[in-house]
Image: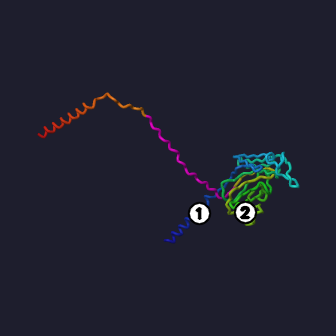
Amino acid sequence: MKRLVMIGSAIAALAWGSVAAYASTATVTTASPWAYACSHTTFGTATATATDPGATCAHGTTGNIGYCKDAEGQPVADTPGAVAAAFASAKLTLTKEGPTCDDMSAGATVKGLTTLTAASWDLGEGSYCQAGAPRLNVVTSDGDTHFFGCAANNVGGHVSFNLTAAGDGNTALAVDRRGIVGKTVTSIDIVQDETGTAILMNLKFTGTAAVTATPTPTAAPTATPTATPTTPTLATTGGGMPLWPMIGLLLAALGLAGFAIRRRTA
């Protein structure tokens, strides 16, 4: 019997673990747009934009000078541009108008996952898709940043990312630190930092759902009852029956009662 109980407990634990694992899996199909220019990021609910950084990020001179450099490594003037990110009708559009060398990018953040086991999207007609952009930037809990480019994972307009070490574009990492399989992720971003427009549809990111703590309900403050005002009453000083006649009547009544009792006992 004891053995049967142990087997039953093991089966129950396995079933519960399966349910818990299933319940923790989620697929995210949305992203929050942002636009970055010169160390400043603008976040938008549906649309985010940023202008050319030249006016606020010039290299010691005036004019439209971004981060582009000449052959000697000196900053040079470039064409003013802008970056924009928008998510509408299940479609993410990321645009960078200025030169790729400018310190500007459009992107979007994927929220709600603590691991990433699969990621994919479809490219809209004429969408930009090259080796470096649009790409996935995934930061893991060990502080490493992992890159997964568009072109290497594009098959006929459908981009399905290889998230293993072999698909990780950050070659500065040691081989055993590449890839995000089995790792906790702290951020997932789609980045367009090359000149062009990326049109991404059918976004799909699957992994472990982030657990949101349920806030402890706060009791509403109890209102202090307001005392009902009463009309002040003055003490009565006169009027009514005097006190001594009342005492006399009371004594008379007691006397009659005593007389009646004596007659009955006589």
Query: Is there a contact, CB below 8 Å, between mark 1 and mark 2?
Result: no
Find residue 148 and report its image quarter: bottom right
Describe residue 149's horizontal placement relative to residue 226 as left or right.
right
Residue denoted by label 1: 17
Image check: 101 left or right of 160? Answer: right
Badge 2: residue crowd in 10 Å (few <14, some 14–19, many ≥20): many
Q: Nearer the viewer, residue 163 or 139?
A: 139
Name the residue beneath numbered marker 2.
Answer: 179
Across and down, in percent, residue 30 comes to 69, 51
Identify the secondary structure beneath mark 1.
helix
**Does residue 209 show up magenta in the picture?**
yes
User: Is any atom of residue 91 visible in this view?
Assistant: no
* Residue at the extreme left of the image, as rendered: 266
Q: Where does the magenta region start and end?
A: 205-229
Above or below 237: residue 201 = below
Which amino acid type is marked by label 1?
A: Gly
Query: What crowding class fits label 1: few (fewer than 14 Cα within 10 Å), some (14-19), or many (20 or more)?
Result: few
Q: State the quadrant of the C terminus.
A: top left
Q: Which secondary structure lies at badge 2?
A: loop
User: Which amino acid type corresponds to the residue marked 2 in the rendered image?
Assistant: Gly
Secondary structure, magenta segment, majority class: loop
Question: With 65 as the anchor, is 5 left or right in this view?
Answer: left
Q: Residue, x 57% and y 62% (percent of image)?
A: 16
Residue 89 image offset from top left, x and y in percent: 71, 47
For the point 72% across and 63% down, which residue is it? 179
